[in-house]
Image (tube, rainbow, N blue to C red):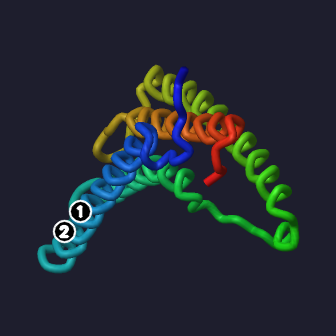
Amino acid sequence: MTVFSADIQRSFLGRLSNVFALTGGFIMLSIAAVTVASIIGRSTMGQSIEGDYEITEMGLAMAVFLFLPECYIRKGHVIVDLFTSHCTPSTIHTLEMIGDLVFTVAVLTMAYRMSLSGLEAKEYLEQSMLLELPTWWTFIVGVISMTLCGLCGIYKLITTFRGGDHE
């Protein structure tokens, strides 16, 4: 019998999500360094880093995807409680479970569709304009991150259905 801990942050998926978020943070720090170097070069020598906008665009896309699983686990998404502020805890619990189910299905659908788009980008050899970087790299990071996010959603649903706390 598989035992599911109600604390997803301590599970393997939680630790993996944390590693993904740290990797996204490292990518953002690297992008910041490239941006600063490009601005300094443009201001002092009249020469910026070639393709700095492409590096920023692709890096930020990857970083955002890498942050999604950790954001989901920590309930960092926007919650509007205008209609639920006066509901009973059981109603809120039910609505959260429905929200997790819808979110999980949506994320796994996006992962599937992104995988098809990434395969198409690779097939047609899509690349950035200046640096000629293949664009399908970004899709790989997106698909893996979205799949992890979906697995975290499945994990939360299973623990909730088995009687675990929905936290």
CB under 8 Å between discs 1 and 2 = yes
Frontmost residue, 67 versus 122 = 67
Amino acid type at circle 2 is Ala
Frontmost residue, 61 versus 22 = 22
Q: Up-down: is 44 above or below 148?
A: below
- x and y percentages locating residue 61 in the rendered image: 45, 50
Can I make out residue 146 in this image?
no
Q: Residue at x 25, y 59 (%)?
A: 30
Relative placement, left or right, of 120 versus 163 is: left
Q: Please tell me the numbered disc located at residue 37.
A: 2
Amino acid type at circle 1 is Val
Relative placement, left or right, of 69 versus 21 is: right
Frontmost residue, 147 versus 60 = 147
- x and y percentages locating residue 129 in the rendered image: 37, 44
Q: In terms of image quadrants, where is residue 36?
A: bottom left
Give the labeled residue for mark 1: 34
Q: Residue at x 74, y 52 (%)?
A: 96
CA–CA distance in space, label 1 to label 2: 5 Å
Q: Residue at x 59, y 58 (%)?
A: 75
Relative placement, left or right, of 166 versus 22 is: right
Q: Residue at x 56, y 62 (%)?
A: 76
- x and y percentages locating residue 78 in the rendered image: 65, 65
